[in-house]
Amino acid sequence: MTTMTKYIFITGGVISSLGKGIASASIGKILEARGLKVSLMKLDPYINVDPGTMNPYQHGEVYVTEDGSETDLDLGHYERFTRAEMTKFNNATTGQVYNAVISRERRGDYLGKTIQVIPHITGEIKDRIKKVAEVSLADIVLIEIGGTVGDIESLPFLEAARQFELDAGEKNVLYIHLTLVPYVKVADEIKTKPTQHSVQTLRQIGIQPDILICRTEKPLSDDIKEKISLFCNVRKEAVIESLDVASIYQVPSVFKGQILDEIILSHFGLISKPSDLKDWEKNVVERILSPKKTVQIAVVGKYIGLQDAYKSIYEAIIHGGIANQVKVEIKKVDSEDIERHGAEKMLKGVNAILVPGGFGSRGIEGKINAIGFARKNKIPFLGICLGMQCSVIDFSRSVCGLKGANSTEFKPKTKFAVISLLNEQKCIKDLGGTMRLGAYPCEIKKNTLASKIYQKNLISERHRHRYEFNNDFRKKLESKGLIFSGTYKKKDLVEIIELKNHPYFIAVQFHPEFKSKPDQAHPLFREFIRAAAEKR
């Protein structure tokens, strides 16, 4: 263990979806603003090894790191808010932990011992936390524990967190509990009992929180804070109010305004430079709250019913708005609704259209129709991963006359397989962690829209896919005006396509949304929103 590293464990109570990920990222941000180096980690209680094989409706977005790990979407928040770089070490699941311990047992590493939750499972969890500290060389590691206190699945992680104070020392570990303080409208009262019960459950496990972050829709009076402080055994100044805000990017300023950074530094006995969030507040928060105009962007997807399914996409669109001082209204369009009602009805009046990634044949024709609508009507368009593949299918059918052109993912026996399985994928049987994942280089062709956007000839972007453009059709599509402006030269794989004589039509095989930040919008999204504003 790195003796200088400090550890903050962040737990949640009362209900799920309170925003532990945003809170963790925001705490990381305010500590970075004090000159400290931070890293963050997510501990997920589910037994899946990673979320890569999970339906988006079950889990939400799968966030991909530079090293090709399929992780929880909260790691996206960590990278967007802070300078910390996420890797395979920054997300651990119950499945990974048990898999590691059982593998060692099968090898005979435990020399005949009985394998138990304590100390073997909790020991593996603690080792993974220490590994993050070792690899990142961070001053402070923030560990978010998924789920809600009281869930049976979370118990090994909470027990490991309890033990960690014994390993690292009381002054090197701090516990933050995020809870809900509901407002009962009919009684016109704020209720503290759920928070009291949540903290009581946490204390029964053996963890006394040092700080409470209270999600609430009404401000907490001094009396309410004193009551929470008394019943939860937490200092009054460490009861932090977390009101709903217009943008998640205001949360660091909200925490800083209640001296949360000072409370944390005081606990650890750390001395640092004064807080500096000026650039963040000026270049991010002010631009969000004071836009110069509004644009409407249609996101045509298969998982529109769940907000978290396209989390990084939505955030990257907002980042593009920040860069252009534009408020972006996102119109979520289910691709199956386009199949039922037509693109004209569902997309009429939007300033730009984005088609994101996905898997499976459901709703594909709706995505293809949306792309055709953008192409024919000169509407700014950005296609991502499956969005690029559908762009190729639309162009092949509509412009090149390849009737029935398709992807072998959707129609294995198609006559014109313009999208097909990567050669390296053809012998793969296990689905988990076997796609083309992580960062790969891409060379950009000069004098193209892509070169104008990126302002460089070589880029690196993150991937998550099995199917690829079929080079057998490259000359045919090029002859009809499709531009192949980006390629992975080592294997001659198409990465970027675009159209001539269109205000903004570009589609990419990779996922640019994973590298966008609120104070540094990804160039593809920045220029996409600029084109939408000009279209308006």
Image: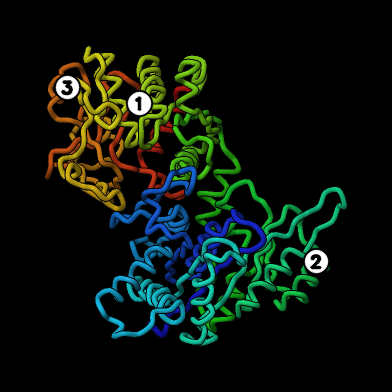
**Front tag of 3 and 1:** 3
Question: Quick one: 73 or 322, which is closer to the camera?
Answer: 73
What is the tally of numbered marks visible in this picture? Answer: 3
Q: Identify the mark at residue 310; answer none if there is no mark.
A: none
- Residue of label 2: 224
Q: In this rendering, does residue 257 appear at all? A: no
Q: Residue sitting at 50 percent across and 65 percent down?
A: 28
Work out which quarter of the rendered image holds the N terminus and state it. Answer: bottom left
In this rendering, would 432 be left or right of 126?
A: left
Q: Identify the mark at residue 478; answer none if there is no mark.
A: 3
Residue 42 in the image: state x and y as whole percent.
Answer: 46, 63
- Amino acid found under the numbered disc labelled 3: Glu
Q: Marks 3 and 1, Cα distance to the nearest angstrom?
A: 18 Å
In this rendering, would 435 be left or right of 253?
A: left
To which quarter of the image does residue 407 belong?
A: top left
Q: Residue sitting at 37 percent across and 59 percent down?
A: 49
- Neighbour class for label 2 at 10 Å: few (<14), some, many (≥20)? some
Question: Quick one: 108 or 202, which is closer to the camera?
Answer: 108
User: Considering the numbered disc 2 on the image, is that residue within a helix, a strand or a loop?
Assistant: helix
Between discs 2 and 3, the one toward the N terminus: 2
- Residue of label 1: 504
To which quarter of the image does residue 485 belong?
A: top left
Residue 135 in the image: state x and y as whole percent.
Answer: 32, 72
- Amino acid found under the numbered disc labelled 2: Ile
Do tag 2 and tag 3 residues touch (Cβ < 8 Å)?
no
User: Considering the numbered disc 1 on the image, is that residue within a helix, a strand or a loop?
Assistant: loop
Q: Marks 1 and 2, Cα distance to the nearest angstrom?
A: 54 Å
Residue 160 in the image: state x and y as whole percent.
Answer: 49, 77
- Neighbour class for label 3 at 10 Å: few (<14), some, many (≥20)? few
- Amino acid found under the numbered disc labelled 1: Tyr
